[in-house]
Amino acid sequence: MKTELESIARQLSQARKPEDVFGTGPESTEDLLPAVRNSYHALVKILHPDLYDEPDDKILAHIMLGQLLEWLGKAQEAIKYGTYGQKTMNSTDLADWI
């Protein structure tokens, strides 16, 4: 399970948008929030600090659980405003466009 914790920690640390954490989800907007919540709950089952014995693992799990909760909030906000799953322009895209 430790490798799972480390893998998820890496994924959360490298995430730039909620879709990097929870995936793009179903095409139906009605099914999007439940899909994100299902992904969140699946990740919580891996990240819960009580699952780990080593102090370093507990600390990492606690920190990652906090980050996961922040990403959930961002995902819920994006779903609310209809922007979840939409491509956002970054500086590289802008440079290609110019």
Image (cartoon, rainbow, N blue to C red):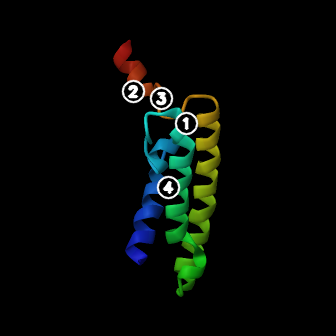
> Does dot 2 land on a helix, a strand or a loop?
helix
Residue corresponding to mark 3: 86
Observer-side mark, 4 or 3, equals 4
Among the two numbered marks 1 and 4 on one chain, the one whose residue lies closer to the N terminus = 1
Which mark is on residue 61?
A: none
Q: Residues within 10 Å of mark 3 (few under 14, many from 20)?
A: few
Among the two numbered marks 1 and 2 on one chain, the one whose residue lies closer to the N terminus = 1
Observer-side mark, 2 or 4, equals 4
Is 19 above or below relative to 27? below
> Does dot 3 land on a helix, a strand or a loop?
loop
Q: Amino acid at mark 3?
A: Gln
Among the two numbered marks 3 and 1 on one chain, the one whose residue lies closer to the N terminus = 1
What's the distance in space between the residues labelled 3 and 1, CA to CA? 16 Å
Please name the residue shown 52% across and 70% down the image. 45
Residues under numbered marks 1 and 4 in contact, where contact means CB atoms less than 8 Å apart: no
What's the distance in space between the residues labelled 1 and 4, CA to CA? 16 Å
Among the two numbered marks 4 and 3 on one chain, the one whose residue lies closer to the N terminus = 4
